[in-house]
Amino acid sequence: MFNTEFLDIPALDSANGTVSLPGSKSISNRVLLLAALSQGTTTIHDLLDSDDTRVMLAGLQQLGCRITPSNVAPGQPLQITGIDGFLPNNARGQLFLGNAGTAMRPLTAALAVLGGDFEMTGVPRMYERPIGDLVDALRQLGCAIDYLKDEGFPPLKIGQPDFSQLGDAPIQVRGDVSSQFLTSLLMALPLLATDRDITIEVVGELISKPYIHITLELLARFGIAVKNDNWQRFVIPAGSRYQSPGSIHVEADASSASYFIALGAITADATEQNSIKILGVGKDSIQGDIRFIEAAQAMGAQVESGPNWLQVSRGVWPLKAIDLDCNHIPDAAMTLGVMALYANGTTTLRNIASWRVKETDRIAAMAIELRKLGATVEEGADYIRITPPASKQAWKAASIHTYDDHRVAMCFSLAAFNPAKLPVRIEDPKCVAKTFPDYFEALFSLCETERERIPVICIDGPTASGKGTIAAEVAKALGYQLLDSGALYRITGLAASRAGLALDESSEETIAEMALEMPVRFDAQQRVWLGDEDISLAIRSEEAGMNASRVSALPAVRSALVDLQLAFQHLPGLVADGRDMGTVIFPHAPLKVYLWASAQCRAERRYKQLISKGISANISTLLADLEARDARDMNRATAPLKPAEDSLQLDSSQMTIEEVVAQVLSWWQERQLFGRA
Ligand SMILES: Nc1ncnc2c1ncn2[C@@H]1O[C@H](COP(=O)(O)OP(=O)(O)OP(=O)(O)O)[C@@H](O)[C@H]1O
Ligand SMILES: Nc1ccn([C@@H]2O[C@H](COP(=O)(O)O)[C@@H](O)[C@H]2O)c(=O)n1
């Protein structure tokens, strides 16, 4: 996941390949609650691991459910032993539910029926998301629910219910604000339908019926056969009791599929045999958002489908503008808003009033951010109308504010395919953790762009000037890849000396051949592997540094390592540190920094570094060694250490690490287009 302040996506050209989607959020949180209320143990496969499922899991654990493992582990099913309709005696406390509507609303209903002493809390935005209609419906039954802050909104206090007045009259609930209220009642009221039918009556037009369809399908899997009377009345039969189905699979998220369906429609030119294959969800999905396919087809996408997969490529180009009632695909419809940027006219998305009460006011958010890109946007209470930028020149490089809304972040990433070839900045990219923590990694694995557009920041300089430290921090701040080119020379030196080779011209060709075939791997923790051996420590000794300096003076060795270094230039960008990053390997890099410090200062830093690792050292020996290394690196014939002509030089002798990082990031920001008039 990109845990950075912002993520700059370079302009992208095309996309091709296969993506496996994470499990559906809607199904995951419903299945978790139903399993928790059931008799027996349920094994859940392919559960989504996200912010919203984590808060649900934590809540269920607090209620006394046995859950193993306690959090979702990749590729491993999760087992829940349910409470069989009764809370343990000591179940009480505060449940923090973040910004997860799919946890707050159903848990409120279930706990209000089960009774107890609970406070339902969340993040500030949760306290702006209405829940009054659900509370009103539950109070009709005799549930005890109080507002702890504003009337009609969380946080809530739940107490012991009194069902003595419960008659046969239907429970009424509004259906025109959020279908989650009805879903919550449908999942909670089977707990009360032990000896009588319970009828729920919808007041007003029921929105988002597909989500109710998911609820009814899942209730059936857990033994509750609800009678659906034309989406207006729902009867839960007497004698209902939750029963675990034993094992259940969570479908991949159809709303998440929308970004990749759009990606295929926008970029995967079928004439070049490009397409996007989406695994985990097919046309026969129980999720309503699967009907996004029809909308994408109406705009021109070519879609093929199998039982559990979709394959999408570009059909018509530019896309066709549409006028669509989106009530049946409220979440996925946001993706249409960004597809509209590539359409041949004005697109209108109607009947989307529910957008206003989601993670943010999505109509307002989409309008503001689409305008930043150069689109003309009209918004109304329940619609949005989007006209794309009038020409290539009318597109603007925008920094997209994401409002802590995963869907805003994901759909706007598709603006990186703009014809003006401008980059797009996504603020707070980690908000995708709500449903798709690895969304950007998945996107980048499919997308291609010209090599020159993938930015590289070069940090060159003499030994112990702080290049490695600064490069790592800058890469972390920007979410970029990291190339420690010195490590490649260190590995080569280590491999050559282990092979008993003389580290000079006499073995030049042999060492170069060895360098070409070294099975080198850097893992996510920045550990360095040579085959199966972790050599992270072995290459960090002063001797390894000196051996690296020797082999790096051999031209054939340098040539052998070029391709390996270039291969690090991945989306979304690269920070490369070394001696010749700016002068030889990435001569067109948009930012080159030559970082240095006085020899005395560098020797002191290295001394402290070694001592802190428990390695004994002597400052004057270190000073002599690093001066010898500087001399060899600066005076060799091939790729000597020197500042690139277009580099910015930084003397870090009197600067802290934080100051150096801030300076490099500030130079980088000055080169970005975002926010410029
Ligand atoms: N500005 C700074 N102020 C104080 N200490 C620093 C500063 N920059 C780096 N250091 C420290 O100096 C030591 C050497 O830094 P680092 O290993 O990053 O240098 P390097 O240039 O990558 O060295 P080499 O080329 O030998 O790999 C580290 O302990 C690091 O924490
Ligand atoms: N681009 C580079 C990087 C390094 N070297 C040589 O490798 C030695 C070790 O590098 P460290 O950055 O890990 O200390 C270094 O002294 C250089 O001789 C290089 O030539 N080019």
Image: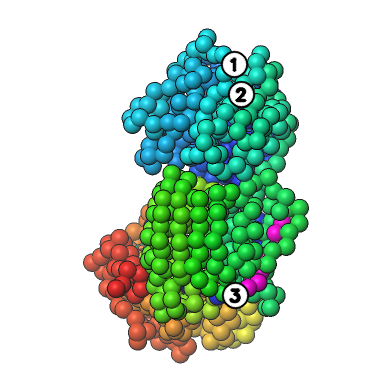
What residue is disc 1 on?
168
Residue on which the image places disc 2: 199
Q: Is residue 312 magenta?
A: yes
* Residue at disc 1, secondary structure: loop
Magenta region, residue range: 309-316
Q: Residue at x 53, y 79 (%)?
A: 450
Closer to the observer: label 2 or label 3? 2
Q: Nearer the viewer, residue 39 or 283?
A: 283
Name the kind of residue labelled 2 in the image: Thr
**Is residue 636 among the parts visible in the rendering?**
yes
- Using the numbered discs, state the Cα–Cα distance from disc 2 to disc 3 in whole angstroms: 50 Å
Q: Name the residue under label 3.
A: 317
Secondary structure under tag 2 reads strand
Q: What residue type is labelled 1?
A: Asp
Q: Residue farthest to the bottom?
A: 637
Residue in the image at 42% along x and 68% along y: 375
Task: Tell me, yes or no, if residue 527 can be seen here.
Answer: no
For the point 65% across and 26% down, the residue is 235
Between the C-alphas of marks 1 and 3, the distance is 58 Å
